[in-house]
Image: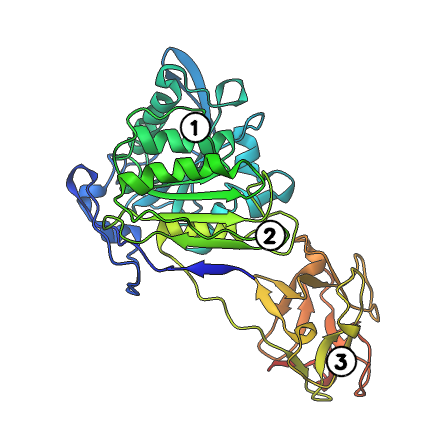
Amino acid sequence: MKQTHHLGRWWTPIAAVALVFASVGVADARPVPTPTDTGTLAASPGCGKTPTLASGTHTIQSSGQNRSFILRIPNNYDNTRQYRLIFGFHWYGGTANDVDSGGSDGYNWSYYGLRRLADSANNSAIFVAPQGNGNGWANPGGQDVTFVDDMIRRIENDLCVDTAQRFALGFSYGGAMSYALACARATTFRAVAVYSGAGISGCSGGTQPVAYMGIHGISDNIGGGRGLRDTFVRNNGCTPQNAPEPAAGSRTHITTTYSGCRTGYPVVWAAFDGGHTPGPIDGGGDGWRSWTSPEVWWFFTGDTTPTPPPFRLRSESSSRCLDVNGANSTNGTQMIVWDCHANANQQFTQNNKALQVLGKCLEVPANAGPGTRTRIWDCNGGASQQWNVNDNGTITSVQTGLCLDVNGTANSSAVNVATCNNAVNQRWAKA
């Protein structure tokens, strides 16, 4: 189980000359203003202009070289709205396209999962995936930092950006580059998140405060990650401490917010039981369902949507609940109804259109017809795992259009999909 220490909303962005930022206290619960609340002083020159830039790959001259980056502009872009600007840096051997596309996890992991969260927060950010020379970030003579300067200039002259809300994050070599920006451009960036980073992209300057989050596995040279963190523990005036870290084998993470930091310049340290990965999952494995995405998004923005409590799905025909048979979390375990109880095999959460239970997703096999049994399977984001929970109590498969149906009222009655008829055995209530 995740353990969290001293978490709270840590800043409220306001307009400020020379990017001096105000903040609220760590435990403040006031809502974070939207980008348009930050005022005209933070508006980039591109605000109000008809943009010439579009989502896709762009090339600019920087330090006498052709350098490229991928730009991702929100749908329904509004040139009067000031957007966050978020840079996502790839790892050694990775590419800008890997960051932008999300790799094998696709959109759900685009920009380390932050694009999905920004889209769900009313398309609140413009994303940039720069391409490193040699697929790395050696930053010779500060060239990569200058490249970032040049990208910011090009983007902000064309698009409407809240210049008080620039952020950088990256994994491995990309984390090193994010750290280099924290050192060299502390007054340019509001905050950085360094995933499994090291100091291999340099640290020019490195004496000014910036909001800093470090994420590191305990079996991945964690001493190096602690060293990067401690640079900003000092710079930000935080109280030094040996932040708690999870035990080996626990498959958990612990997130610590340092105390005593200068107002508006927090330091957060998230240590996890694992190795060199940007997407650890508590309990084992990695992927887009990692806790890292929401925690970094929360750190950057202060936006946090309370997690809805789990719910049971009670059949109106029997008053029994949808149940994973035998509480077996093995892929393919079929669904039944059973007397309602409080155990985990009846506790569902809804993530967009996915219904999740026991860490798996409710699904119906591909190309299923009426009478096909429903089951659980590793979540994959496919249409077979997407369901519409309708106002009339029915639950319909996005893939087939069929309704979740129970063919009896006794314990262990099978739950399948069937042609929708709005009968009582196809109506379910959250309980």
Question: What's the mark number on residue 337?
Answer: 3
Which dot, 2 or 3, sits closer to the camera? 2
In the visual, does 350 lie left or right of 157?
right
Point out the image quarter for the C terminus.
Answer: bottom right
Q: Position of residue 114 (x, y in %)?
A: 47, 47
Amino acid at the residue labelled 2:
Ile
Residue 368 visible at all: yes
Callout 2 secondary element? loop
Task: Mark 2 or mark 3: name the one nearer the start of the chain.
Answer: 2
Q: Position of residue 309 (x, y in %)?
A: 53, 73
Q: Position of residue 284 (x, y in %)?
A: 65, 52
Count of number-bearing discs? 3
Question: What's the mark number on residue 227?
Answer: none
Question: What's the mark number on residue 199?
Answer: 1
Amino acid at the residue labelled 1:
Gly
Estimate the spatial distance between the alpha carbons at disc 1 and disc 3, rounded to whole Å: 55 Å
Q: Where is residue 103 in the image (x, y as percent from the top left)?
A: 61, 38
In the visual, does 418 lie left or right of 37?
right
In the visual, does 197 lie left or right of 377?
left
- Residue at the image point whose x is 75% and y is 83% from the top: 338
Callout 3 secondary element? strand
Task: Mark 1 or mark 3: name the one nearer the start of the chain.
Answer: 1
Callout 3: few (<14), some (14-19), or many (20+) C-alpha neighbours within 10 Å?
many
Amino acid at the residue labelled 3:
Val
